[in-house]
Image (spheres, rainbow, N blue to C red):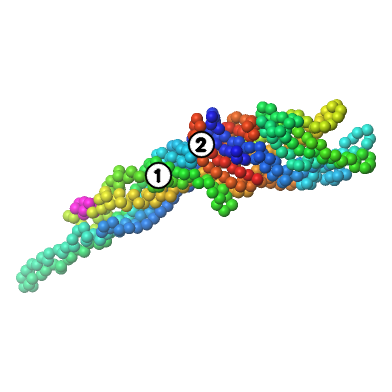
């Protein structure tokens, strides 16, 4: 079966290529990996994004969260490393560690790190022919080894929001998926399969 | 599996080629040579258009009926004395009583060197194979389709047309030469016979071959440092990746496809 099938153009990015793109994106724009309240990040810079401190029963809660290592993907079919949250049809797993430091009422800092798996799908963020972009939708999060289960669910709910914020900023332009060879009119995809994000369409 | 794999079927490859033809634009050449008693200086411009693409494994693009649109200007220079012998008008003498013999002056006609301009435009179609060549040139990755050999150009009809145009142009130029009247028709015939179809073919073929010999279409050009996202907000710098290697080939499954494989970092 041809790559283009019923269309004229095919573009496919292998998961190794997606990881290179994620590394390039978050290296250039590290503030999308690191978020902190004013005690940690007084103002948004290239390196970190300042977020307001939450209001919770009058407590002064200051925190800093950051993803390290840079998130990486495992596109379906998943490998052994994605066992906690295997990607299914048209899905891929994003893996990273969510590191945090929390200070409550100026007490001693509480630090930790969670190994996070996120189940994701690609979607068309911008559909304009030639200049469209592919984005990432986070469907579900899995954190290993938190007990009891209800606490794990609470934490996963919070982490889902964090990862949705982190990954919402990531965009893969059509032009990148075709390595600049063609302006793409997207007709099919994006689909996640055989370790690739694939698109098909016609030349602009 | 490469980091990025792009495939284009023959329809998309045809569009790519036609865009490359347009980008190549109009080419110009000029030169001169001798053609028997004639000195010929010429200038030519040409552009390429059209053609049907057939992708052939492992890395060939066959372009059928590619059109070479050309515009030629010739200037044929020669000494007319080489065609028509110089001659002298006979002296006529009359006897005038009481004066004696009075004769007309001796007038000799020494034919000039003339230049005959000829303009000609036409289209010649050819079929040729091109191989794909991906390479780094300076800071840019290029994929060129480079012609294999020199295609055979069918120019016999054009050569005949040029020869006919030469005859017409010669007649117009010669008409302005004093004393040419009785010799005009013969001179035109002599000029076209002296050059002949073979001469024009021998002149036209090498000129047009200059435009197809080594012909190369650029079908891909991207900087090695490839911009993924431009800088947007003041706090969001541009996102770039490195194109570390590019390879171009043709694959065949249930259809033929042009493949571009890219490794990035």
The image shows residue A26 at horizontal and vertical percentages of 73, 43
Q: Is residue B69 above or below residue B100?
A: above
- Looking at marks 1 and 2 on the same chain, the residue that comes earlier in the sequence is marked by 1
Q: Around disc 1, counting alpha carbons within 10 Å, would you say few (fewer than 14), some (14 to 19), or many (20 or more)?
A: many
To the question of a shared chain for discs 1 and 2, the answer is yes
Instruction: Report helix, strand or loop for mark 1.
Output: strand
Q: Residue at x 21, y 53 (%)?
A: B190
The image shows residue B134 at horizontal and vertical percentages of 53, 46
Residue B111 falls in image quadrant = bottom left
Task: Compare residues B188 and A78 and report the one nearer the observer.
Answer: A78
Q: Residue at x 60, y 49 (%)?
A: B224
Side (left or right) of A36 relative to B179:
right
For the magenta stretch, what is the residue range? B184-193
Using the numbered discs, state the Cα–Cα distance from disc 1 to disc 2 in whole angstroms.
Answer: 29 Å
Mark nearest the camera among 1 and 2 is 2
Side (left or right) of A70 relative to B168:
right
Whether residue B22 is visible: no
The residue that disc 2 covers is: B251
Q: Residue at x 73, y 31 (%)?
A: A83
The image shows residue A66 at horizontal and vertical percentages of 80, 41
Task: Compare residues A148 and B162 and report the one nearer the observer.
Answer: A148
Of all chains, the one bearing label 1 is B
């Amino acid at each position: 079966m041809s790559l283009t099938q019923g269309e004229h153009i095919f573009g496919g990015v292998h998961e190794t290529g997606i990881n290179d793109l994620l590394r390039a994106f978050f290296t250039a724009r590290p503030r999308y990996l690191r978020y902190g309240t004013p005690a940690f990040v007084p103002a948004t810079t290239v390196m970190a994004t300042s977020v307001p401190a939450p209001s919770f029963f009058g407590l002064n809660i200051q925190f800093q969260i950051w993803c390290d290592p840079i998130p990486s993907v495992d596109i379906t079919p998943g490998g052994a490393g994605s066992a906690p949250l295997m990607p299914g049809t048209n899905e891929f797993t994003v893996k990273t560690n969510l590191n945090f430091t929390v200070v409550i009422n100026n007490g001693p800092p509480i630090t930790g790190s969670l190994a996070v798996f996120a189940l994701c799908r690609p979607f068309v963020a911008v559909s304009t022919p030639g200049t469209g972009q592919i984005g990432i939708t986070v469907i579900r999060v899995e954190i290993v080894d938190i007990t009891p289960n209800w606490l794990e669910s609470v934490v996963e709910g919070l982490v889902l929001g964090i990862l949705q914020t982190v990954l919402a900023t990531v965009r893969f332009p059509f032009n990148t998926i075709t390595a600049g060879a063609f302006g793409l009119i997207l007709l099919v995809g994006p689909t996640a399969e055989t370790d690739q994000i694939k698109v098909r369409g016609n030349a602009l | 599996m490469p980091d990025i794999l792009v495939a284009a079927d023959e329809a998309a490859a045809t569009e790519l080629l036609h865009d490359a033809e347009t980008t190549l634009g109009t080419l110009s050449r000029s030169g001169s040579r001798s053609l028997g008693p004639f000195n010929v200086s010429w200038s030519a411009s040409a552009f390429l258009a059209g053609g049907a693409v057939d992708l052939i494994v492992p890395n060939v693009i066959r372009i059928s009926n590619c059109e070479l649109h050309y515009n030629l200007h010739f200037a044929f220079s020669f000494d007319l004395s080489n065609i028509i012998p110089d001659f002298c008008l006979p002296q006529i003498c009359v006897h005038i009583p009481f004066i004696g013999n009075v004769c007309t002056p001796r007038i000799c006609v020494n034919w000039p060197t003339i230049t005959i301009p000829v303009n000609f435009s036409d289209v010649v179609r050819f079929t040729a194979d091109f191989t794909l060549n991906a390479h780094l040139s300076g800071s840019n990755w290029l994929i060129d389709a480079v012609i294999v050999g020199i295609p055979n150009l069918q120019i016999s009809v054009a050569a005949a047309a040029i020869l006919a145009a030469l005859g017409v142009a010669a007649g117009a130029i010669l008409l302005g030469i004093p004393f040419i009247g009785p010799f005009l028709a013969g001179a035109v015939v002599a000029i076209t016979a002296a050059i002949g179809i073979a001469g024009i073919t021998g002149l036209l073929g090498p000129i047009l071959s200059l435009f197809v010999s080594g012909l190369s279409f650029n079908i891909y050009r991207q900087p090695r440092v490839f911009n993924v996202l431009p800088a947007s907000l003041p706090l969001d710098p541009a996102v770039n990746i490195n194109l570390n290697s590019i390879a171009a080939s043709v694959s065949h499954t249930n259809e033929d496809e042009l493949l571009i494989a890219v490794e990035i970092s």
